Structures are given as C-alpha cells and as structure tokens.
Image: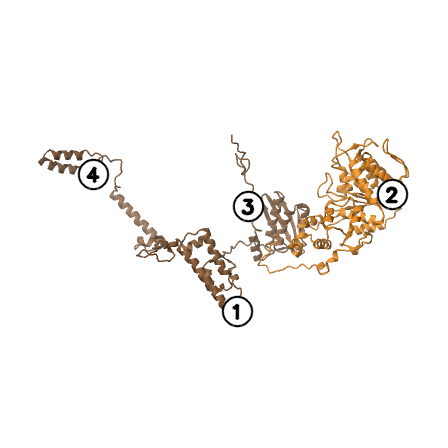
Amino acid sequence: MAAAVRRVLWLSGVSGAARARPGAQTLRLICTSTAVQNRSHIPGPPVYTQDFIKEQTEEFNLGKRHLANMMGEDPETFTQEDIDDPKELFPSKSVCQWGEDGRPFHFLFYTGSQSYYSLLHEIYAKLLRIQKYEDEMRAQGSFPGTGNELKLIGSRWLIKEELEEMLLDKLSDQDYSLCIRLLERLVASPCSGIEEEYMAKFRRGYVVQVQRFMNEPLQYDEQGVAFSTGEGKRKTARATVIVYDNGSGKITVNGVHYIHYFPILQDREQLMFPAQFLDRLGKLDMVCTVSGGGRSSQAGAIRLAIARALTSFSTKNEVECMRQAGLLTSDPRLKERKKPGQEGARRKFTWKKR
Amino acid sequence: ITARICLNGIVNQDVQIAEEKPRAIFRTSESNPANHTEQHDCQHYSIPLEEVKVIFPHGLPRRFKEQIETFKEACLMVRKPAVELFGYLKSTNFAQPAIRYVLYGESGTGKTMTLCHAVHYCAKQGWLVLHIPDAHLLVKNCKQLLQSSYKTERIDQPLQASAWLKNFRTSNEHLLREIKTQQKYTWNKWDSTEEGRPLVEMVEQGITRMKTATDVVGAVLKELKRQCSLGSFKLLVAVDGVNAFWGKTTLRKRDKTLVSPEELALVHNLRKMVMNDWSGGAIVTTICQTGSVFKPRLAYLPHELLGDEGFSALEPFVPIQVPKYSEKEFESCYQYYLDRKWLQHEKARTPDGRAELLFLSGANPAQLERLAAML
C-alpha cells in the first residue's frame, strides 16, 4: 500500500515538474490521506514462510496415508472423493423437488409434508381395496375368517421417530397418531391378510431380551423333597427363603407363622404374589429368615427372595413372564440423603417472606 | 392381584369335594344346641332373632352383631370344641363342685363365639346364665370409681354394675322371679331388701339406685352361689376374658396410685364366683389377649395370659383349645358367605379366589370375616 502510494507520488512528481501549480496541489491531496497509511493494528493477509508451508504439506500427506490405511483404501490413489460420502453431501431431502419450470414433481408438494400425506392416501387406497375384496368374497358367499391378529403378536407399530425417518418429514404427535389409527383400521378389517407385506413395513418386532436365566438346579433333602433357596433385599431388609415342594402353603418367617409376623393384609399380599402368579399357591412350603428394614421392606425382600427361589421350579417361559411382571427385579429405591439447608431430602424450610 | 400367564398351558383344578354336593351342606335345621353332635360339625345353625334378644342382650362380639343386622339372621357354626364342651356339660355331676372349662386359642379363632354357643345351650336347657361379656371392660376405661360403702378399701363401679344388672335381668327374668333371698340386705339408710323377696326386686333396686349397684351384684352372686348348691336350679357362669381378673388394671385412684384387681369390688366378687367351692352348675371361661392390658400380642396359652396367680387360682380346670378353621370349616364358612351374597367380587367364586382367601386369612375366622367384608 505504501509502495503504491509512493508510486503515485513519483508519477505525480514526474508530471508535476512539467506542469504548473495545479499538479502540486493534487500531490498534496493524495499525500494527506493518512487514514490509509496507519493500519498496523489490522492484521494483514496471513503470511507463511515457505518452510512452514512445506511442513504442513508433508503432515497433510502423512495424514492422508494414515486415513487411507484406516479406511482400507490404497494410500497411493487416495483422493478427497473417496472420503466424501455422497449421501451426506446430498441428503435425499435436499433433492430438488421441482423441475426446471418451477412446477413441483409431487402433487402434494404444497401441503408441506408431501410424503406423509401421500402415505395416508396410499393406506386409504389399500383400505378401499380390502373392502372391495371383502365385498367380492361376500358376493361369492364365502365369509372371511379372522386370521390376521396372530401376526400382530410379537411386533409393534413404528414409533414416531422411526416414521419420521421413513418419511423424511417432521411429524407432530397428532399426525403420528392419525397415521397409526388408520393402520389399526386397516388391520381390523377381516380381509387384511392380502396387504400383509405392505403392513409389515410399518411393524417392528420386539427385541427379546435374553436375560441371564438364573438357573440354579433343584436340591433334594433327605426325604427326597425338592427345595431351593433364594435371597432378596429391599431398602435395608435382607431375606433368605427356602422353598420346599409338595407343601400345603405353610409359611414360617423367623420361626413365627406368617399370620402373626405380618398382621397387616398388604404384607401378606406381597408374600402371596409370586406363588399365585405361578398358580402354586397352596402347594409350596416356605421357611424365611429376614432382618433389617421395616415391615413393608421386609415383606418386599421376602417376595423377591421367593420369586428368585421359584425360578428353579419353573420353566423358561414362566421365568420370562415373572421378569416382565417385575417379580425378579430388585427395587433400587433407597432413602434419599438429607441435604444441608433443607429440612429433609426434598422438603425445604418454611419460606418466610421477611 | 391375580395374574394369568399367557404362555402357561397348565391349568390347575382344585377338586372341591363340597362343590359336588348341594350347597345347603353348610346349613343345618337343628336349632336346639342340645342336639348338636359331631354329625352337625361344620354346619351353620340359625338362632331366631327373638331368642337372640332375650338370651344375648350382651355377650355377642360387635362384628357378629353387625353381621346379624346385615343378614337378618344369626348363624353360628357348630365346631368341635363346642361339641366337646356340650359332651362335658351333659355329663356333669351336679352334686360335685363345679368344673371350670377354659377356652383358649389364638386371637380371632372363635372363643367368644363358642362361649355364646354354650350360653345358648344352657339357656335352652333352662339353666340360669351368669354371662359376663368382657371382663376386660371392668378393669380398663372406667370413668366413675366410687369408694365402696360396704368395705372402705374396695372400689365400686356403678356404671358397669348397673348395665350388667339390666342385661342380666333381661336374660334370666323368669328364673329370677322364683329365686328368693335368704337374708335381709340393707343397702343404705333408706333402702333395704327383706328376706324372702324375689331376686328380681333386688336387681331392680340395683338398676335404679346406681350407687348401690355394685353391692347388689355382690349380694346376687352370693345368693346364687348359696342356693345353687341346694339344687333348685342350675347355674352357668360364663366369663369372657377371665384373665382380666388376675393381672393389672389401667385404672388409677384419686391419688394417682394404680388400682389392683382385688380392690375392685366387682372383680373380687366375680373371683369368688369362679372358684369351685359351689356345686350345681359349671363355669365356662375364655382367656383373651385382644382386650387384655399389658400382655404380648402373640400370647394365647393359659399360663401366659393368666399369669402365675391366675393359673393357680383357676387350677384345676379343663382346657379346651379352639383352633383355626380346618379345611372343612373354611369351606363351610366360604359357602355361607357365598350363599348370603356377601362375597360380591366375581373372582371370589373361582377356585383361585378361594385359594387367595384361604392364604390371606390363614384360616383365621376373624381375618376371613374382615376380608370378606372388604369384597
């Protein structure tokens, strides 16, 4: 910049010698524009030394070879195009929806969520097809059976996020529920078997959780009666239970009959739950020892222990059912700590305005 | 809380023997307890409501009274302890001193009901029934305590005494008219009862003049004891909660010192009644933890509840245990509730519901009754 200014001056100087006073005045005008000269606080264009540039190039090449190795490509012929994923660069949504004349391709473009409404149209078309098929069947005289509900077991409808992913459209909760209702209506009609593959697109199967099957083998005591032990806990109570087969529904807790140990109905209901769930209410004898906690947590601990002991007596399906009923899960809730500045764990001191 | 396992194909079927027979198996038409034998075991018999008003002005458990009002009938189950007791009562030798029978058992198993059954039996037979509904009421929650005029160190309870006398008169009116006093009693400066007057007069005297009620009770008991040995009538002393007579009370005197049971005049006289130094009748008692003071909840054996003093005082006695419901008794009670449409829950009719009831009540009659009331 300074060099350019100097050049201007020099040029003017050459011409200024031949000319009269007006040229000298022009010189002065250009010289007095100081605003351009004092710009040291603004950083200029980044200036790199040649060595620095060479270093960076080498590092870049090295990095490129590393990346090629990691991606499994040939390091020699590795270019930027191999790294770029066309899908990320060009997400399907960003495909141009209208042609050269500005007219959109899809007839529902102006609804705002064209894929969603077109889906609704499709489903309705399927529904009409099913009804037409049903009418034809009835006209022929054969009444349709109900064989459709079976395939609904073990699968669930898409959740809202999955549907959004499928349609690449934002949905609201009402839109989603409307779609699901329409699908349910489709399923409810008797001849919906003909549209099975279409509906399968909207169903996802449940992932069967393979939990660790607590498979302790049954032990046998002197008389040949099968028994098994279980341990359970709830809050601070710890319980161990020995369940004997071929019993009459007698339960002893810490040497005391369960009616006397648990005079409250709620606790006895807790004891009853595991055996009743497996339909073995009057068939098992139990001997329990429990310590710690209060009345309710002792009952909960014994319930968990009984359920765990009963896994040895039951089949895998029964154990899975118990797990889903929540009998085999230990209750993680504990007493929450009291915090300073508060009266309890959550309760604050009475707020006084002044 | 019943949950069905959808993948479980095993169906358990409890074979109920009673369900195959007609439902009336749990009822019997024999309303005279004298004819109840083992054949009628586990069956309900009903007492006509007029008899209930006469024989049981007091003495029935509160919940049973409510049940009578709801069902419009008073149905009692014939159980083995009652039948056993009747066997003993039928074979009593009235020349011998009165035998004491103590009904004991866990709380809620039906001791008071068995006692009421015995009272009904004796009333039907024409005995004079001295029924003290709950002796624990005498030793706790007493509002008015008067110093006795008869013996200064004793304490009177006018309210309890007069209430009891009223009920006593209702149940035994016809017999009391016939029994005559054998001694003159002077209650105070203005009142006295001559010799030879019917006992009813004395009783009425006690009811009207509350201050003398306790003394009247003492006098009545003395007369009855004396005359019973002569054999003109048979006396049944039925006390519920006899362990209240020995033990502690929750009452305090004016100077805040504890009252011991001997100092209460009523208790003193009743203790004399329960002694086996008279003949011509029987003494049937129950020991009860439910209303007792300062006794552990799970105690039910005679020695635990009576204490050393009471045990030695009551000794020798015939203990009769009243157990929980057996299978048959439970079935009978269950069918009775179903018949009366007391169990409204639809699951209650199923075998599963029955098993649930059995487990949750633990075959305890009181627990079963409370459970059934909730359904």
Q: Amino acid at mark 1?
A: Ser
Spatial CA distance of label 1 from label 4 is 95 Å
Residue B64 seen in render: yes
Mark 4 falls within which chain?
A: A
Amino acid type, label 3: Pro
Q: Position of residue B198 (x, y in %)?
A: 88, 40
Q: How many marks?
A: 4
Q: Which residue is mark 1?
A: A142
- Mark 1: secondary structure: loop
Crowding near pointer 2: few (<14 within 10 Å), some, many (20+)?
A: some
Which label sits on residue A332?
A: 3
Which residue lies under the disc numbered 2? B177
Q: From the top left corner, tell me how far across and down residue A219 is, in percent.
A: 62, 55
Task: Tell me the shade of chain A.
Answer: brown
- Colour chain B is painted in: orange
Which chain does the residue under circle 1 lie in? A
Task: State whether discs 2 and 1 lie on one chain.
Answer: no
Establish if B3 lies above or below A347: below
Identify the residue position indicated by label 4 in the image.
Answer: A1
- Name the residue type under label 4: Met
Subunit ID for the residue under disc 2: B
Q: CA distance from mark 4 to mark 3?
A: 74 Å
